[in-house]
Image: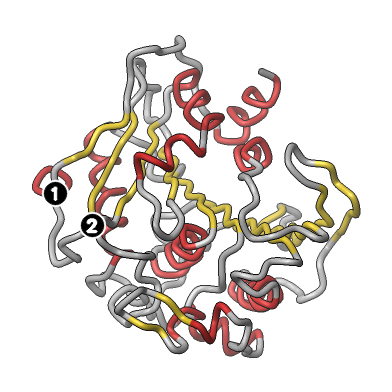
């Protein structure tokens, strides 16, 4: 209960009575306005029985080979919080695909016609349909879903306020050796895509040329014994996002041995010039790829 209360304060949610009957439902493509985006992209939404005034939208992205209907079971705390505080859960889906496309030029360009633009259209529909607060759009996911989190933060910084990514890769990394047949990149997954902080930052800025507005806060998680997505990608993400957010490469503060719900983490925190924490990198010593979401900490962030 206390955890959800902290989460509500962090997200700025308004209290609403608990709901019991709400369920995850698919929104037809014609309804959410799918235009010029991949035909496989589908939208699912969870709307609590009592919706807050100008509710936030919390987007949850499933991993490779999973589904939106499976993902809703991976985020029980977010679902309970949505019921209690009246915010919207948005779950994109990509039936027939192995992973999200976060490697093609279409997906790595603002309004380029890829998976990222489809999710952007879903977000805009949710804002319009439920009078959601456009300044409180949050996104989280793991593995392939975490890759989509970082891609959305890069390609649509105008929509995303903050994101939490577990075991993902830097935005743009998946383009190195990307295979459209299975939406995979051996180069990036293997930790072989190495750039300078400036190169990563320039890559992100080129995804939305001329954009000078807000950049999302970001939080990453990874086990340093991950054999599916090389832990080197955490270091590359740090270089990328510290450059994009105009931060020093060295963290502002660190702590060791933080005991979360599912694992112990060594954490690095970066604050901006105003003193706000805008980037966090969590490392679980000995942690593997398929670690549970640290939902309480994601909701707080």
Q: How many marks?
A: 2
Q: Residues within 10 Å of mark 1 (few under 14, many from 20)?
A: some
Location of the N terminus by quadrant is: top right
Q: In this view, does 149 lie to the left or right of 2?
A: left
SS at mark 1?
Answer: helix
Closer to us: 9 or 46: 46
Give the labeled residue for mark 1. 29
Closer to us: 278 or 29: 29
Residue 77, horizontal then vertical, whole percent: 56, 29
SS at mark 2?
Answer: loop
Closer to us: 204 or 47: 47
Image point (25%, 60%), residue name: 96
Quarter of the rendering containing residue 157: bottom left
Location of the C terminus by quadrant is: top right
Q: Earlier in the sequence, mark 1 or mark 2?
A: 1
Quarter of the rendering containing residue 165: bottom right
16 shown above or below 216: above
Q: In this view, does 270 lie to the left or right of 256?
A: left
Image point (44%, 89%), residue name: 177
In this picture the colour scheme is: secondary structure
Image point (27%, 70%), residue name: 114
Q: Which residue lies furthest to the top in this view?
A: 17
Give the label on residue 41, or none. Answer: 2
Image point (51%, 36%), residue name: 75
**CB within 8 Å, label 1 to label 2:** yes
Give the label on residue 135, or none. Answer: none
Residue 67, horizontal then vertical, whole percent: 36, 48
175 shown above or below 169: below
For the residues marked 1 and 2, what is the alpha-carbon distance in whole angstroms?
A: 8 Å
Residue 215, horizontal then vertical, whole percent: 52, 63
Q: In this view, does 108 lie to the left or right of 13?
A: left
């Amino acid at each position: 209960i206390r955890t959800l209360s902290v989460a509500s304060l962090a997200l700025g949610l308004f209290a609403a009575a608990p709901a019991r009957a709400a369920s995850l439902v698919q929104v037809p493509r014609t309804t959410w306005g799918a235009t010029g985006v991949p035909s496989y992209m589908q939208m699912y939404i969870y709307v609590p029985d009592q919706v807050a005034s100008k509710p936030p939208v919390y987007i949850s992205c499933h991993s490779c080979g999973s589904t939106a209907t499976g993902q809703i079971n991976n985020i029980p705390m977010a679902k309970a919080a949505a019921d209690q505080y009246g915010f919207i859960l948005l779950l994109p889906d990509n039936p027939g695909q192995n992973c999200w496309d976060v490697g093609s030029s279409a997906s790595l360009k603002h309004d380029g016609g890829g998976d990222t633009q489809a999710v952007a259209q879903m977000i805009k529909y949710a804002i319009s349909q439920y009078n959601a607060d456009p300044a409180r759009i949050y996104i989280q996911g793991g593995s392939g879903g975490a890759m989509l989190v970082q891609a959305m933060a890069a390609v649509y910084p105008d929509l995303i306020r903050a994101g939490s990514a577990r075991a993902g890769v830097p935005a743009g990394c998946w383009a190195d050796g990307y295979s459209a047949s299975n939406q995979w990149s051996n180069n990036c997954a293997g930790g072989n895509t190495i750039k300078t902080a400036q190169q990563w930052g320039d890559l992100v800025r080129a995804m939305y040329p001329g954009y000078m507005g807000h950049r999302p806060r970001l939080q990453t998680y990874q086990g340093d014994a991950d054999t599916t997505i090389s832990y080197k990608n955490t270091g590359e993400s740090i270089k990328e996002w510290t450059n994009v957010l105009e931060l020093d490469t060295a963290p502002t503060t660190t702590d060791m041995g933080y005991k979360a719900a599912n694992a112990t983490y060594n954490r690095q925190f970066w604050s901006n010039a105003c003193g706000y924490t805008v980037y966090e990198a969590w490392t679980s010593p000995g942690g593997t790829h398929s670690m549970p979401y640290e939902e309480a900490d994601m909701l707080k962030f």
